[in-house]
Amino acid sequence: MKANLEYYKVFYYVAKLGSITMAGEQLSISQPAVSQSLKQLEKVLGTKLCVRISKGVRLTKEGELLYSYIQKGYEEMELGEQMLSKMLNLDVGEIRIGASDMTLQFYLLPFLERFHEKYPKIKVIVTNAPTPETLRYLQQGKIDFGVVSTPFEAKDDIQAIEVKEIEDVFVAGRKFIPYKHHTLDLQELEKLPLISLEENTSTRTYMDAFLAKNGVVLHPEFELATSDMIVQFTLRNLGIGNVMRDFAKPYLEDGRLFELRFNKIIPKRHFCVVLDAKNPMSAAARKLMQLIQE
């Protein structure tokens, strides 16, 4: 670009309004300043762009040609500014979130509901994935933030904020009723048919590590992709289900399932919101994070 962008801006308004005076009023600059900018642009480009007439100015052929291009570019820039303003005011935009079934259902969903009520024009995209995959999406910049469950390994750039305490339990149906009123040793789990999540999940990793410290190694008969399915298999007496308590809560309360008790307490863990310091969030995502932190 040969000339100062500000010269093109002045030229655009002069050509659009057909008046140096009106262009000055639009730009909040003096009439001499408008004339000087035009002269500088003409000098740089080496041609006359407009001539004065009784009612303002008229573009030369060269000026008409230049304006046909300047008009498109400048109006696109103005449109860009308008859309950016709308995005910052949450009139348009999107949020990209990574969450598992568990974190979405038992933590994030109420916040999304409140956010949507306040900002209905914001598009929310939730990528449903286990914790390791969510962390990978975050580091790749594919999501604004994630909601995951501990334990997990993350790079130094990842900031984790604990937001909810969760508890893992083993539950069973009526076929296993003899175990209901007994305090069991953890070793008993090796003798029971177990239903658990797949190995690439934080829940399975956590439980395997805890039991290994107590000399217990599990070999589940069923490994499923979701905790909802674990509950359904357990209701059909296909084994002992290992899930977060919230998934089984309705069935524990109505008596269709019961919780196994052990002589050692399974430590609680947490849901965490994870952010990547090197990947700034969108304006809409920042607003949702404010809502969550309130």
Image (cartoon, grey):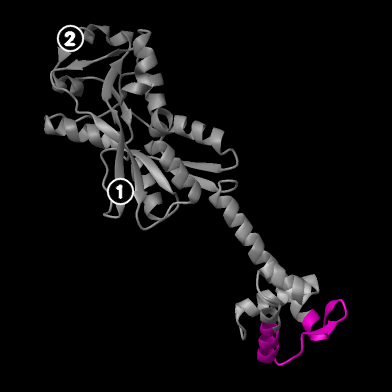
Q: State the quadrant of the N terminus.
A: bottom right
Q: Quadrant of residue 190?
A: top left
Corner quadrant of residue 197: top left
Q: Amino acid at mark 2?
A: His
Q: Are marks 2 and 1 in contact (CB under 8 Å)?
A: no
Q: Position of residue 274 (x, y in %)?
A: 34, 45
Q: Say which of 57 and 245 sits in front.
A: 57
Q: Nearer the viewer, residue 281 or 202?
A: 281
Residue on which disc 2 sits? 182
Q: Is residue 233 magenta?
A: no
Structural crowding at the residue carrying mark 2, measured as other residues with C-alpha within 10 Å and reported as few (<14), some (14–19) or many (≥20): few
Residue depicted at 25% across the width and 39% down the height: 151
Q: What residue is at 36 percent from the left and 58 percent from the top?
A: 278
- Is residue 150 found left or right of 63 in the rendered image? left
Sequence-first disc among 2 and 1: 1
Q: Residue 69 or 156: which is nearer the viewer?
A: 69
Where residue 41 sits in the image (x, y, percent)?
A: 67, 85
Identify the magenta region: 36-64
Assign a secondary structure to mark 1. strand
Residue type at numbered disc 1: Gln
CA neighbours of label 1 inside 10 A, class few (<14), some (14 to 19), many (20+): some
Where 221 sits versus 156, above or below? Answer: above
**At 32% from the left edge and 8% from the top edge, which residue is drawn?**
174
As drawn, 139 above or below 109: below
Residue in the image at 19% along x and 28% along y:
267
- Image quadrant holding the C terminus, namely top left
Q: Is residue 208 in sight in this rendering?
A: yes
Q: Is residue 39 magenta?
A: yes
Q: Does 68 sit left or right of 184 as displayed? A: right
**Residue at mark 2 to residue at mark 1: CA–CA distance:** 42 Å
Question: Mark 2: which secondary structure?
Answer: loop
The residue identified by callout 1 is: 159
